[in-house]
């Protein structure tokens, strides 16, 4: 969208319209291409999951990981989930991909468990609203976890705050059922969208993930400090765990520490990494000395 907007302001008149429609055409072509390749991505073995650790501040220990999808196609190269997830959602391919994600994450969890005797790790997966609202989702997820022999209590489902808006009643009921199956539910990207307090009050969530956009301003904006500290306090009074997303700077880390934020996730701790790297991170406790700020 941004390239369209840029063309829009630079040129005017007929020429502008031509460029505009050409770039709309280019976007449409790219979408169609991605959709076409995405349909074969599972069969061609093009998908992998990377895992990003979540550091618990009180324990100074990694207590969870978030599974993040990676797609590398021979023609397209690496494609960002920000680009292909919406296409997968529109075309319905997300249901099949979502199933693949859950199964892979379960199998990975079992592999980690074999390598580590007393593994205590919560694996979070992102669940698309489209996927959640497909008929039989509850039956499918229940069957999948039973087949893979994973107790749902080891898993957390991240749902974004934005998708719930249109189907609020339906979503609540599904989340309650998922909760009854034993999954933890977290609200992802909190603060990025409408952040309606209605969701915080009514959704059966255990965890709130503060969006990176809130964290970005933390070190140099007093108002943002007030907002974040108040959100953390509110979440705690609601018995919710708070995770800060996208923490990149030691300064942000320290501020969040003083606010008693529960967990930190971000490049400061680690980028998302291949599954093989996670065990070594769980074992090294001295990884997380926060560097001095200049
Ligand atoms: P998200 O669920 O909010 O995931 C966090 C995103 O922020 C990830 O981007 C992660 O790599 C990035 N990130 C984490 N820490 C930092 C940081 O310190 N700095 C910066 N600049 N970025 C950071 P990623 O992996 O590109 O995923 C983007 C979005 O795509 C995700 O946002 C999620 O909404 C969606 N997504 C990714 N994987 C899946 C999946 O398996 N299923 C579904 N349904 N959606 C997914
Ligand atoms: Mg997420
Ligand atoms: Mg997020
Ligand atoms: Mg986010």
Image (cartoon, rainbow, N blue to C red):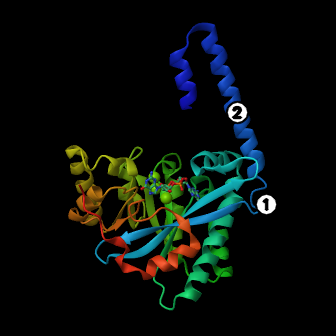
- Disc 1 versus disc 2: distance between alpha carbons? 24 Å
- Report crowding for label 1: few under 14, some 14 to 19, many 20 or more residues within 10 A (C-alpha): few
* Residue nearest the observer in this picture, 286 or 258: 286
* Residue nearest the observer in this picture, 152 or 268: 268
Residue 288 place in picture, x, y as percent: 34, 71
Residue 89 place in picture, x, y as percent: 65, 49
Query: Which mark is on residue 34?
Result: none
Res 235 → quadrant = bottom left
In the rendered structure, the answer to whether residue 134 lies left or right of residue 56 reads right
Q: Earlier in the sequence, mark 1 or mark 2?
A: 2
- In the picture, the quarter occupied by the N terminus is top right
- Provide the residue designation for mark 2: 28
In the rendered image, the vertical position of residue 78 relative to residue 233, given as above or below: above
In the rendered image, the vertical position of residue 213 relative to residue 185, given as above or below: above
Can residue 172 be seen from the camera position used here? no
- In the picture, the quarter occupied by the C terminus is bottom left
| Secondary structure at numbered mark 2 | helix
| Secondary structure at numbered mark 1 | loop
Asked if the residue at tag 2 contacts the one at tag 1, i.e. Cβ–Cβ closer than 8 Å, the answer is no
* Residue nearest the observer in this picture, 198 or 184: 184
């Amino acid at each position: 969208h941004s390239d369209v907007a840029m063309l829009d302001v630079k040129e005017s008149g007929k020429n502008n319209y031509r460029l505009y429609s050409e770039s709309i055409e280019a976007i449409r072509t790219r979408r169609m291409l991605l959709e076409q390749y995405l349909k074969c991505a599972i069969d061609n073995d093009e998908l992998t999951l990377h895992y990003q650790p979540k550091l618990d501040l009180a324990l100074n220990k990694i207590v969870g990981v978030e599974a993040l999808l990676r797609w590398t196609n021979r023609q397209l190269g690496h494609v960002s989930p920000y680009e292909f997830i919406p296409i997968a959602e529109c075309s319905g391919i997300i249901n099949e991909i979502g199933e693949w994600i859950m199964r892979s994450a379960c199998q990975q969890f079992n592999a980690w468990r074999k390598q580590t005797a007393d593994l205590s790790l919560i694996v979070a997966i992102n669940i698309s609203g489209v996927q959640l609202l497909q008929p039989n989702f509850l039956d499918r997820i229940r069957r999948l976890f039973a087949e893979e022999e994973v107790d749902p209590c080891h898993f957390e489902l991240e749902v974004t705050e934005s998708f719930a808006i249109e189907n609020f009643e339906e979503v609540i009921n599904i989340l309650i059922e998922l909760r009854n199956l034993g999954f933890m539910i977290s609200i992802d990207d909190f603060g990025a969208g409408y952040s309606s307090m209605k969701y915080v009050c009514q959704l059966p969530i255990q965890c709130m993930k503060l969006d990176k956009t809130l964290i970005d301003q933390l070190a140099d904006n007093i108002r943002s400090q007030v907002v974040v500290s108040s959100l953390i306090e509110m979440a705690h009074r609601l018995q919710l765990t708070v995770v800060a997303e996208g923490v990149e700077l030691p300064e942000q880390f320290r501020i969040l520490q003083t606010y008693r934020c529960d967990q930190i996730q971000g490049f400061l701790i680690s980028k998302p990494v291949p599954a093989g790297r996670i065990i070594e991170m769980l074992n090294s406790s001295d990884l997380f000395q926060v560097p001095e700020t200049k």
